[in-house]
Image: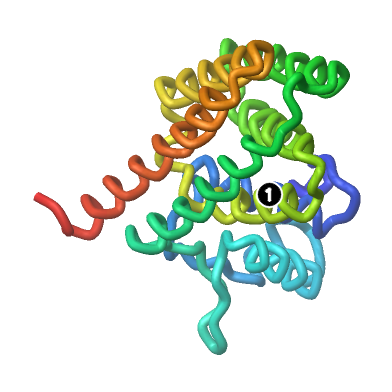
Amino acid sequence: MNEALALGGETPQDRIVQRIEEDIVFGRLHPRERLVEEALAERFGVKRHIVREALADLERRGLIERFRNRGAMVKAYTPEEVEQLYAVRALLETSCAEMLPLPMDPARLAELEALQDEHDSAVAAQDLPRIFRLNVQFHRVLYAGCGNPYLAGVIDEFAQKTHAIRFYSVVQPETIAYARDDHRAILQAIRDGDRQSLMAICRRHLMPSKEAYIDAYRRRFGLIE
């Protein structure tokens, strides 16, 4: 059985996008690493046009770049781009936290608590793919609660772009535990109706992955001693 057929997802394209996204997030594919259509078609057992469509989707998500006559490669953000990207994320996500109705709708809060229980279990098992997917879903449900689907959609779009950045931190046990504890603090702030704490936690929650990427980038390319 080829890799694409072994994955969940609606279409072969969706399944390829999911696997390549995970390869990037977990550091199996590195910034500036080439993605060769022929090799991917063989790996996933599909025609090249399906691979091409999957790469176009990954490019829209900000995970890869495609160049005429050079093919595709994993996106490599500079430290300056990362600072700018995370500044936008901080602005969007703290603004959304400021808009969230408090007290929160009990059904949404219960959904968040159930997701976090699953996330806790995944962290305890060190199940990285499950940790990653549950983390994404937790934030989608949280920010959808602001009542503005356009804002929630933009937040999700910018979060996807940082999947190419997060691989320096997402596999580290200490940063995984940090994220888990932040999620629990977010839930407590919601239960307490403490908006200022909620906004502060949402802002600080972004920092570890940003700082880890910038530090690793500078070390890799000799920008610091």
Task: Pick the residue in front: 190 or 33.
Answer: 190
138 vs 183, left or right, is right
Does 110 sit above or below residue 167? above
Q: Residue at x 55, y 19 (%)?
A: 180
104 vs 70, left or right, is right
Task: Pick the residue in front: 158 or 165.
Answer: 158
Name the colouring of the figure.
rainbow
Q: Residue at x 50, y 46 (%)?
A: 90
**Circle 1 crowding by C-alpha within 10 Å: few under 14, some 14–19, many from 20:** some
- Count the marks: how many? 1
Q: Residue at x 57, y 11 (%)?
A: 124
Under mark 1, the amino acid is Asp
Does 80 sit above or below residue 210? below
Task: Pick the residue in front: 148 or 73.
Answer: 148
208 vs 104, left or right, is left
Q: Secondary structure at mark 1?
A: helix
Does 64 sit above or below residue 212? below
- Residue 188's spot in the image, x, y percent? 61, 12
User: Can residue 24 be seen from the camera position used here?
Assistant: no
219 vs 42, left or right, is left
The quadrant of the picture occupied by the N terminus is: top right
- Residue 15's spot in the image, x, y percent? 78, 50
Residue 65 image-quadrant placement: bottom right
Residue named by callout 1: 156
- Residue 14's spot in the image, x, y percent? 80, 54
User: Can residue 95 be seen from the camera position used here?
Assistant: yes
- Residue 178's spot in the image, x, y percent? 46, 21
Which residue lies most toward the left here? Answer: 225
Which residue lies most toward the bottom here? Answer: 69
Q: Residue at x 42, y 28 (%)?
A: 172
